[in-house]
Image (cartoon, coloured by chain):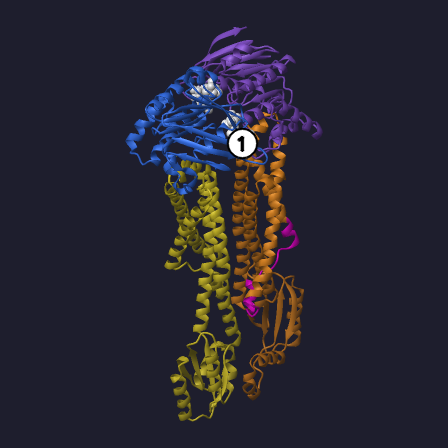
Chain colours: A yellow, B orange, C blue, D purple
Amino acid sequence: MNNLWQYRVRNVFSVTIICLSFLIVGIFLSLSNNLQYTAQQISKNMVIVFFLKKDLSEKDRNTIGEKLKKSSEVIKTQFISSEQALGKFLEKFPELQGIVNNLKINPFPPSFETTLKEKILSSDETQSFIQSMQNMKGIDDVQFNKDWVERMQSLSRLAKAVGFFLGGILILASFFIISNVIKLSVFARKDEIGILRLVGATNTFIRIPFLLDGIIMGILGGMLSLFVLFLVIKLFPLYLGSSLGALNELINFRYLSLSQSISLIGAGAVIGFLGSFSSLAQFLKV
Amino acid sequence: MNNLWQYRVRNVFSVTIICLSFLIVGIFLSLSNNLQYTAQQISKNMVIVFFLKKDLSEKDRNTIGEKLKKSSEVIKTQFISSEQALGKFLEKFPELQGIVNNLKINPFPPSFETTLKEKILSSDETQSFIQSMQNMKGIDDVQFNKDWVERMQSLSRLAKAVGFFLGGILILASFFIISNVIKLSVFARKDEIGILRLVGATNTFIRIPFLLDGIIMGILGGMLSLFVLFLVIKLFPLYLGSSLGALNELINFRYLSLSQSISLIGAGAVIGFLGSFSSLAQFLKV
Amino acid sequence: MIELYHIWKQYQKPQWALSDITFRAERGDFCFITGPSGSGKTTLLKIIFREIFPTQGQIVINRRNILRVPDHKIYSLRRTMGIVFQDFRLLFHKRVFDNIAIVLQVLGIARKDIRRRVFNALRMVNLHHKMWEYPAHLSYGEQQRVAIARAVVNSPKIILADEPTGNLDPELAFEIMSLFKEINKKGATVIICTHDRELIRHFGHKIFFLYKGKLLRKETL
Amino acid sequence: MIELYHIWKQYQKPQWALSDITFRAERGDFCFITGPSGSGKTTLLKIIFREIFPTQGQIVINRRNILRVPDHKIYSLRRTMGIVFQDFRLLFHKRVFDNIAIVLQVLGIARKDIRRRVFNALRMVNLHHKMWEYPAHLSYGEQQRVAIARAVVNSPKIILADEPTGNLDPELAFEIMSLFKEINKKGATVIICTHDRELIRHFGHKIFFLYKGKLLRKETL
Ligand SMILES: Nc1ncnc2c1ncn2[C@@H]1O[C@H](COP(=O)(O)OP(=O)(O)OP(=O)(O)O)[C@@H](O)[C@H]1O
Ligand SMILES: Nc1ncnc2c1ncn2[C@@H]1O[C@H](COP(=O)(O)OP(=O)(O)OP(=O)(O)O)[C@@H](O)[C@H]1O
Ligand SMILES: [Mg+2]
Ligand SMILES: [Mg+2]
């Protein structure tokens, strides 16, 4: 503690580097959180529409409805009659009101809108479920936004890639940086260590202050990075304005969860400890 | 040069930090390039549609067409007749073929599709131009995708924000880091500087090797960061796969332009030089 | 009791810094090691407090073969020793007081006692008025005296002093030597390397003469 | 010609490290400064080669008031001086050769000449066989001799030596002193701080005695 203050310039420097490392990890963690969240949102809204034959009897329709409800793949099913479909269409394209009113018949078929449990549409169960439904009597067509499915899958992959690949590399990199910074500070005090050994200090006596320094620096760096991350997350959207619409979801950062924050600080402490410990070994000879 | 090799551990460390700083700057510069590019793409495709009254005489239509063509705001104008509009609609919604065929009249009005020169739709000139057109006889309505306009404007703002705000802060931060690293290495050699002064070396004699070291380290760090950036940009999309569609544009990085790359290396050299020079000053007394 | 058996030391081929040194200092001896510059005096002392290892040979201190003591246990030997290094080895970022107190802190001595004992040690070398200075603000001879105070502060059983009066005036050198002699009289073994013939003549009890790594003469006055 | 007029130096209040020193060394003088540890000898030398500034007073060297010379021009004064520091100030990451060559490199002397002159300087202090060693691999006395070789290698007009023989045996100390005397005979002014009465008695020409920062006696033998 005493020494932390004595070498305050170097230590401010070290803590800054630790903080920057963790900040990078934190930003990507937060981005990963965000993408995970977006992917979830998208798959929650994934709807499969089963269009029915127009002349379907009520009984057949109910059979299909029951089958959908009972299927273990399905969370929610909603029947949309021809009239409801027309209403929805007019909501979307009000300028076509005139045309539609001129028509004598309703061109929209009735349908079931279904929300699936599985989030990944390409999974075998989902695929075979859709297949089996398509083959049922009375079902005319199945429609779902293929683009969005693929986009969602890519996003999910992106979240994992950023979270694990980049995050992993960056944590390794920051471990390297941190242990080197601490080695630097141990190195600067190698005379002191040498003299302590020569006047009869035990290894534990020599280690403890260095370990404490390392742990404190790691924790400080971790906490500082959380604080800076918080500022970045709060201030960044303010600066950009909020008119990005859907893109907003992608660019806005979500703050880390409590357990993630604690893990980050804990990782700081562990890295500080390991960094000090490993840096000391070579000086505790003779 | 000789000294660079002597202190190789610390220098590898310094170059790594310089490289990381520039890498961060480079990533954001590349992201900024990318957003700028996307914003451009979007605004290139920005089309304003002027719907015409159905019963407009050919003469009036030509007047409007001429006015649009002559306006200094407009790059391209295309007349879309009612029939063309219907064709486009059927292309988009083939399932409505039946309904449309049943109609006796064509519900789509003729229109002019116009591409504007100005990229920012909210600019005063553009606004007043649209206003003046709207007031013209024979024009029924003006339509443009307001969402996309605003999204584009936000993106453009985002590009600037990231490019200048974050980029600026990060360049300042890396200047701070770099000059501190160099100060550290000058500090480690302050005995040497002191002895050189005491045996009668001129300040220039003392400075030159340090300045060279600083410049070489800065250039090495800059070049290394360009190389790593190149790797990141090439490898990242490979890892993610290419099925992101429109999002791809946003996440894919574009490499820096030649002049940006040269500026980055130049900045490395300048920062190395300034860092060394300013770090030396305090040791050239007595 | 310090016994060296056939000690050889080679830093770099082909020269031997020490060759075949056999030497014995009984408890309570007051020994001088002398010899020209580069003859191996410092090397010999370093081997005794095991900062470096001999290439060959055995060292027995108080019946323990110290070459067999592992690194992490060597502290118990060092705690019985007081060492004055030829290059002082002071900590320049710590005050004179802390430089000396460190020896007692390592032993786990109470804060109050530390204060008193450090002051006494400094008074013995005539430097109590510089207790709160930093070593960089002392003259070279004063730094040497701090190193001496640090060596004697824990009343060691063995004192190893390497050229402890090289930067002191003759009067002060004499005083320091008398201090060592006093500690010696209380039962400590003292080994001093020096070039000062005057001091050897006056205080010498056992005298070893090194020349190019060889023990040439042993005299007992 | 070195002239000091009413030099006062205070590092910290309230003590004066030097008080009212007036002193003159003619060209070709061979002066000793002596006095107990902490009396201000090193301070006096440091003021002469302008590592530190006096609190009051004037220093004139070869008719130049050196307190008026700006920092970036002081090198021309230092190039005429050879200084042996009490703490040697060797560069531990450079070999003995480079430690000495640095003085000549600064003067822009040709590589070949440097080699020859460094070797000659090392031979004068009996250390040519350690030319390619690092200082850390030398004994303390050997390091001191490297410092001496560095001071004399550029045939300076003024030699300032601070306790140059503190870690050397009497024979070697005598040789070193003879070396200084020889350079002195060629016209250089030599000022040496030492505690060694023997050397002063043998070589002393002008002797200054410092005590607690005051110049007590000047003797000319
Ligand atoms: N940098 C400094 N700051 C404060 N006080 C100092 C400093 N350097 C020296 N002193 C004090 O000034 C006085 C004279 O010191 P100086 O080094 O000149 O003595 P000296 O005659 O060379 O002694 P020695 O023979 O021990 O080398 C001493 O009391 C010392 O403590
Ligand atoms: N670390 C080292 N590596 C290589 N050689 C060394 C090392 N330390 C000492 N030597 C050499 O060993 C020999 C003996 O050195 P030592 O320091 O024991 O001499 P010394 O008797 O203490 O001399 P001095 O009176 O000058 O201090 C010298 O020739 C020296 O150059
Ligand atoms: Mg020695
Ligand atoms: Mg002195």
Ligand 1 shown in quarter:
top left
Q: Quadrant of residue D114?
A: top right
**Is residue D74 visible to us here?**
no
Classify residue D73 as left or right of residue A143: right
Q: Is residue A263 magenta?
A: no
Q: Quadrant of the N terminus of chain B?
A: top right
Please name whichever residue, B253 or D118, is drawn nearer the observer in this view of the structure: D118
Q: Which residue is mark 1?
A: C17
Segment colored magenta: B240-262
Label 1 resides on the chain identified as C
Where residue C214 appears, as percent x and y from the top left, is 52, 28
User: What amino acid is labelled 1 in the image?
Assistant: Ala
Query: Which quarter of the figure has residue C62?
Result: top left
Does the beta carbon of the residue at mark 1 sit less than 8 Å from ligand 2?
A: yes
Position of the C terminus of chain B by quadrant: top right
Residue at x 46% of width, y 32% of height = C46
Considering depth in this image, is D160 or D134 the residue closer to the camera?
Answer: D134
Q: Residues within 10 Å of mark 1 (few under 14, many from 20)?
A: many
Residue at 58% x, 73% y is B51
Q: Would you say C191 lies left or right of B271 here?
A: left
